[in-house]
Image (spheres, grey):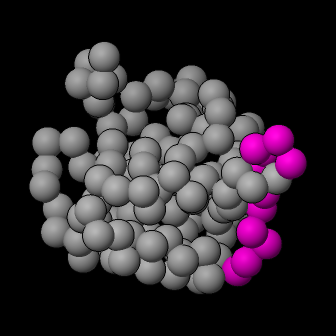
Amino acid sequence: MLSAFSRMLLVEGLDDWVMLGALSMGFIGRDPSPDEFILESRAALEPLLREGLTVMGDLSATGGGFRVWGSSVEECLDRFEAAYRDDPTDQRGLWSFGMWLSLTQKGADVAKKCIDADPDPLGIGDLRD
């Protein structure tokens, strides 16, 4: 079973690619330490990648399109962690602009079921508007 945090990322992916900056939505109302942010974010991302619901990449394809990295799950997660830790602006910087998720067809199917069951798994809809 996917966590609410993972389900939120899937639901976000129904509209478009998901910039990893969206991970911050999982921490609304909290101020996590860098270690907490990484630990909880990795826990949300890992099942999405491992179960083939999403792929990680960037927007370097022709015309700014999505390019899948084609790396292992661990390499993707390590790349996220390294970029986050190396960001000099501490959680609000440019690290997230270079990292995106794209739903696979399997992920889109699961996301549609998630949104039917609970369109706002983290209960943050009112906070974002």
The x and y percentages for residue 52 are 73, 61
Residue 114: quadrant of the picture: top right
Residues drawn in magenta: 62-72
The stretch drawn in magenta includes residue 56: no
Q: Which residue occupies 29% across, 30% down?
A: 123
Q: Closest to the observer: 100 or 40?
A: 100
Q: Which residue occupies 39% across, 63% down?
A: 41
Say if 43 sits above or below 126 in the image: below
Say if 30 sits above or below 50 in the image: above
Say if 5 sits above or below 128 in the image: below
The x and y percentages for residue 129 are 31, 17
Q: Closest to the observer: 98 or 53?
A: 98
The stretch drawn in magenta includes residue 68: yes
The x and y percentages for residue 95 are 44, 62
Q: How many marks?
A: 0
| Identity of the residue furthest to the right in this view | 62
Judge from the rendering whether residue 6 lies leftward or rightward of residue 93; answer left or right: right
Q: Closest to the observer: 49 or 109?
A: 49
Say if 119 sits above or below 4 in the image: above
Q: Which residue occupies 23% across, 71% down?
A: 34
The x and y percentages for residue 94 are 42, 57
Residue 23 can be seen, yes or no: yes
Judge from the rendering whether residue 107 lies leftward or rightward of residue 22; answer left or right: right
